[in-house]
């Protein structure tokens, strides 16, 4: 059976201490922390040493920091941000840094997007290697994204000799939106899971706000995706990453997540 992890986006209102306690209460020791939650670590100034001590106290492994945004648009500012996040990840004990491509309709042209991606991977590789941190490349399925294809990501990783430095994030939401059938389980370092249940929204109109916990009404075929990944050899965690305010506002997040875990286990 797969192992599960909890991304802080699952319960973003919880302070880090309570978030780690939630993970432990669900029987998991794996979490993802984020650098985009106002009033919470990392944005609130919590030091990496504090995060590391808190994780050790709870017996938690930080599998990633999520994320370096617009990673495939390499600029001096991006380089500085990358160094800062990689240093923070290493100091707090995180194993990886998620790399999210720009998602604003720019940089999509054939040739341009591959060149941008190759440049960024080339620049990131020595920084990640020096820190002992894995770079988790996460293609997004949105039609305006500059990196939708996992195949294109894999080809770029191979081109820079980055097979030991970079892995893919298979996000079940983005995999469904991208419509790319190949899984690349052997290149996958992390799986993000979330469902969409709204029957009225078209696939092309699905957005982060539609993403809920995985349950019986899921339209993204999460359990089929998970079964296929496991059959193809994926052995890493399945990390919950719902963005819907309906999930963030539940009174008992432990019960809601436990129900989703049970559903997934029963159906794979």
Image (cartoon, helix red, strand yellow):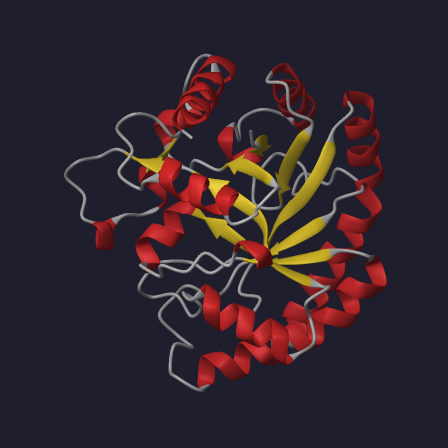
Q: Residue at x 54, y 37 (%)?
A: 238
Q: Is residue 166 above or below residue 160?
A: above
Res 68 quadrant in image: bottom right
- Give the residue at the far left of this rendering: 200
Percent coordinates x, y for residue 195 in the rendering: 35, 36
If the image is split into quadrants, where does the N terminus sit?
Answer: top right
Report the number of numbered marks: 0
Residue for point 45% across, 84% down: 112
Q: Choose between 265 and 49: the one closer to the eye.
A: 265
| Residue 224 visible at all | yes
Q: Quadrant of the C terminus?
A: top left
Q: Nearer the viewer, residue 142 or 229?
A: 229
Q: Position of residue 33 (x, y in %)?
A: 64, 39
Left or right placement of residue 132 versus residue 116 in this view: right
Tell me if 84 is positioned left or right of 37 in this view.
right
Residue 68 in view of the camera:
no
Question: Where is residue 90 shown, x and y percent of the image?
Answer: 81, 50
| Farthest residue, direction front | 231
| Residue 182 on image: x %, y % | 41, 60
| Furthest residue in direction bottom, as rendered | 111
């Amino acid at each position: 059976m797969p192992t599960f992890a909890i991304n802080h986006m699952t319960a973003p209102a919880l302070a880090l201490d309570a978030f780690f306690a939630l993970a432990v209460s669900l029987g998991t020791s794996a979490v993802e922390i984020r650098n985009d939650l106002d009033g919470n670590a990392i944005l609130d100034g919590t030091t990496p040493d504090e995060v590391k001590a808190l994780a050790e106290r709870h017996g938690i492994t930080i599998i990633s920091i999520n994320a370096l945004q617009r990673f495939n648009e390499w600029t001096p500012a991006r380089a500085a941000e990358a160094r800062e996040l990689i240093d923070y990840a290493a100091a707090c004990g995180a194993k990886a840094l998620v790399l999210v491509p720009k998602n604003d309709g720019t940089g999509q042209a054939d040739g341009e997007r591959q060149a941008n991606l190759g440049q960024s991977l080339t620049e990131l590789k020595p920084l990640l290697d020096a820190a002992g941190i894995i770079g988790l490349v996460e293609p997004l399925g949105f039609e305006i994204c500059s990196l939708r294809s996992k195949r294109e990501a894999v080809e770029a990783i191979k081109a820079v000799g980055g097979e030991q430095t970079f892995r893919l994030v298979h996000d079940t939401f983005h995999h469904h939106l991208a419509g790319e059938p190949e899984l690349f389980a052997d290149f996958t370092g992390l799986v993000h899971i979330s469902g969409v249940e709204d029957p009225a929204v078209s696939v092309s109109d699905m957005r982060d706000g539609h993403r809920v916990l995985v349950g019986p009404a899921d339209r993204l075929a999460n359990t089929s995706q998970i079964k296929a990944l496991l059959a193809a050899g994926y052995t890493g965690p399945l990390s919950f990453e719902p963005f819907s305010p309906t999930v963030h506002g539940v009174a008992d997040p432990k019960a809601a997540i436990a129900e989703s875990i049970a559903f997934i286990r029963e159906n794979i």
